[in-house]
Amino acid sequence: LPGALGERLVARDPHLREHGVQNRKRQAWVIDQYRNPHESLHTMDEVLRWFDEEGLEFRRALPGTVFQSDFSLDYRRSLFEPESRGSRLDRWLRQVQQMWGDTEGGLFVMIGRKR
């Protein structure tokens, strides 16, 4: 949103007001929400299907694919250490948990490698 009008509208964004987002995180939020040229929605199952179709081996997801699994930045664990895909129900529950219990709004990252 260009100009002063755009900045006034951004200042009224409910996420920024409710969560008291400041500084760099605020700037990243504004760029992501208002200046992003393309955004698409995908499920964990959809991404896992793409991995299978392209011959990629699933290694892990952040957050994990298993309901209520917890990832910590423990330096003894690698981001590429294999993790369970979980069941379809696990993944569905994890995504619901992210949508309603996470301030990042369902963002997840999936890591794979060539077989």
Image (cartoon, helix red, strand yellow):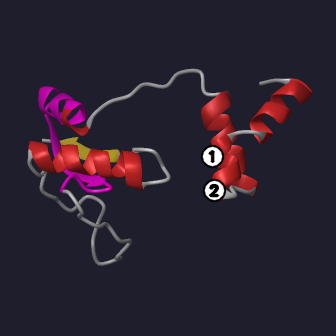
Reply yes or no: does residue 7 show up in magenta: no
The residue lying furthest to the left in this view is 87
Q: Secondary structure at mark 2?
A: helix
Please report the residue visible at 8 percent of the width from the left and 48 percent of the height from the top.
87
Q: Nearer the viewer, residue 89 or 28?
A: 89
Residues at discs 2 and 1 in contact (Cβ within 8 Å): yes
Please report the residue visible at 76 percent of the width from the left and 36 percent of the height from the top.
10
The residue lying furthest to the right in this view is 4
Residue 15: give its label.
1
Residue 112 in the image, given as x and y percentages of width and height: 24, 45
Rendered-image quadrant of the C terminus:
top left
Reply yes or no: does residue 64 show up in magenta: yes
Residue 19: give its label.
2
Please report the residue visible at 32 percent of the width from the left and 30 percent of the height from the top.
42
Pointer 1: residues within 10 angstroms few (<14), some, or many (20+)?
A: some
Rendered-image quadrant of the N terminus:
top right
